[in-house]
Image (tube, rainbow, N blue to C red):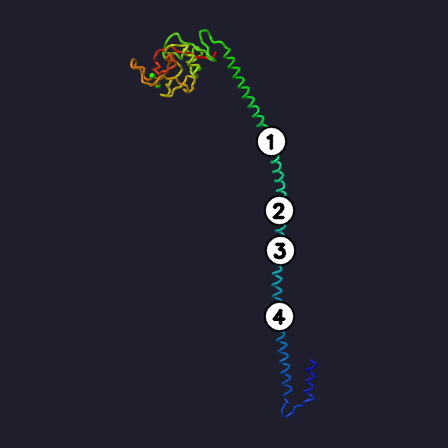
Amino acid sequence: MEEIYVNAEYFKYDNPIPSTINRKGPRSSKRSFYSGVTLSLGLLSVLLLIGLITLGVYLHDSTASLSATSSKLSSMTEERDHLKANLFAMRNNLSAVTEERDNLMANLSAMRNNLSSMTEERDHLNARLTEKTKELERLQSLSKQNKACPAGWRKLSCSCYLLSERSDSWDAARKDCRDREADLVVIDSSEEQMFLATVTKGNSWIGLNDKEQEGQWKWVDGTPLILSNWMTNEPNNVGDEDYPQWGEEDCAHDRGIRLWNDISCSASFKWICEKMP
Ligand SMILES: [Ca+2]
Ligand SMILES: [Ca+2]
Ligand SMILES: [Ca+2]
């Protein structure tokens, strides 16, 4: 600025311009100069103002963004604390559950040991029971063998046998045996079959029939027929020509020769009873 004034003085005193040509010249240059300066300053001020406004807007936006970020951070911190608390609680629960599981495993292990011990004891007791049962059966068998049969009955092994004195139908024969606390003979061994040949030499009812279902022969004690001594071509279920009214052949008799035949249950024979002593 000082330089401007110096230059102005220069124009005023050192370079006088002829008054005829430039009486208005210096003043006009000065005015132009000042106008330029003023314009520049004005422009500069406007630019500064724009800069300040822009800066203000920027600062305002930044502050708002900072505030939002701060709020979000606060919310996240709160959430983190909440999650931490949850995690802590879950760890405690997990610890309790783990402890309970360990207790249960220990109990299970103890129970397994008990079970194993009990199983071993049970097997031991079963083995002893089997042994005692066999011994009891042996003693019972001996006892029966030693028991005498009633008068008139013949004995083989554990059974007593009686041949009837009269003849009758199969049903009447069975009733007679049951009245004597016996039943019609059940032949379940070759030895017994051989023995019966010494009890009777003629036709005798035995405790075998297929009344329930044709062809399904059963002993009177309910056992199925396993050992059989049928005559050739028997059982044939053909009926008797002389007694057509008797119908089918559903009862068995021993011919007295260790062989059997099926015949009508209404036929009349002697019979053999069997019972325990
Ligand atoms: Ca028998
Ligand atoms: Ca039959
Ligand atoms: Ca026959």
Q: Which residue is mark 2?
A: 87
Give the image quarter of residue 118.
top right
Marks 3 and 1 sit apart, C-alpha to C-alpha, by 59 Å
Dot 3 or dot 1, earlier in sequence: 3
What residue is drawn where x is 50% and y is 12%?
145
Look at 36% across and 21% down and name the residue there: 215
| Amino acid type at mark 2 | Leu
Q: Is label 3 within 8 A of ligand 1 (CB to nearest ligand atom)?
A: no
Dot in front, 2 or 1? 1
Closer to us: 263 or 3: 263
The amino acid pointed to by label 4 is Gly
Query: Residue 256: x, y in percent?
Result: 38, 12
Distance of label 4 from label 3 (alpha carbons): 32 Å
Image quadrant occupied by the N terminus = bottom right
- In the picture of the structure, the residue carrying the numbered disc 4 is 51
Question: Disc 2 versus disc 3: distance between alpha carbons?
Answer: 20 Å
Question: In the rendered image of this protein, does residue 56 appear above or below residue 105?
Answer: below
Closest to the camera, between mark 2 and mark 3, is: 2
Quarter of the image for residue 255 reads top left
Helix, strand or loop at mark 2: helix
Query: What residue is shown with label 1?
Result: 113
Amino acid under disc 1: Asn
Give the percent coordinates (x, y) of residue 72: 61, 56
Tag 3 secondary structure: helix
For marks 4 and 1 on the same chain, the one whose residue lies earlier in the sequence: 4
Q: Quadrant of residue 57?
A: bottom right
Q: Which residue is mark 3?
A: 73
> Is 147 placed above or below 40 here?
above
